[in-house]
Amino acid sequence: MKNARVFRGGGMTGGFEGPFMNFFSFLFSLVGSLLIIYGGLRATAELILFEVFKKPYKYQQIRKELTNRIVFGLEFFIAADVLQTVLDPSRDELLLLGTVVLIRTVLGYFLSKEVTEYQLD
């Protein structure tokens, strides 16, 4: 049973993977957050330029770019959650990960579908 703990901080690697996985989990969460924040700020700026200064933007294009960044950011959050669960693969953690991945996947699917199917202009 000692080899079963290789990914949980024990076993042959001497616990190196714990800080390693935590670092990358944090990094992926940070990248996901930055993508969503950047997308929101950029969409806000483009919307202001469109409404106030009559720049050549379209609502559909602004919304599509924002949605794409949100979906991409959600994928980074899923990767971070998977890495955290690898560190502590208890039944509760696995159920939580499955639920979170399902919700984020469904959300990403419908956001992507909305952008490709609906014309808002």
Image (tube, rainbow, N blue to C red):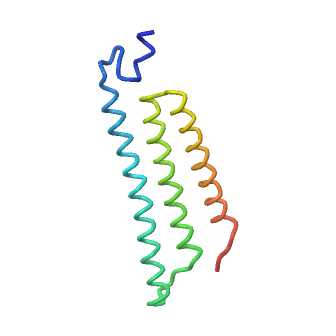
Q: Which residue lies furthest to the right in this view?
A: 117
Q: Residue furthest top?
A: 1
Position above or below: 68 against 15: below
Closest to the observer, 110 or 61: 110
Q: Is 31 on the left or on the right of 68, as rendered?
A: left
User: Residue at 65% of width from left, 58% of height from top?
Assistant: 110
User: Residue at 66% of width from left, 64% of height from top?
Assistant: 114
User: Residue at 41% of width from left, 17% of height from top?
Assistant: 5
User: Residue at 35% of width from left, 22% of height from top?
Assistant: 9
How far across and how far down the image is residue 94, in percent? Answer: 54, 32
How far across and how far down the image is residue 1, in percent? Answer: 45, 9
Closest to the observer, 36 or 93: 93
Please give the count of numbered marks on the rendered protein.
Answer: 0
How far across and how far down the image is residue 13, in percent? Answer: 32, 18
Position above or below: 112 against 46: above
How far across and how far down the image is residue 41, in percent? Answer: 41, 70
Q: Which residue lies furthest to the front in this view?
A: 92
The C terminus sits in image quarter: bottom right
Position above or below: 21 against 68: above
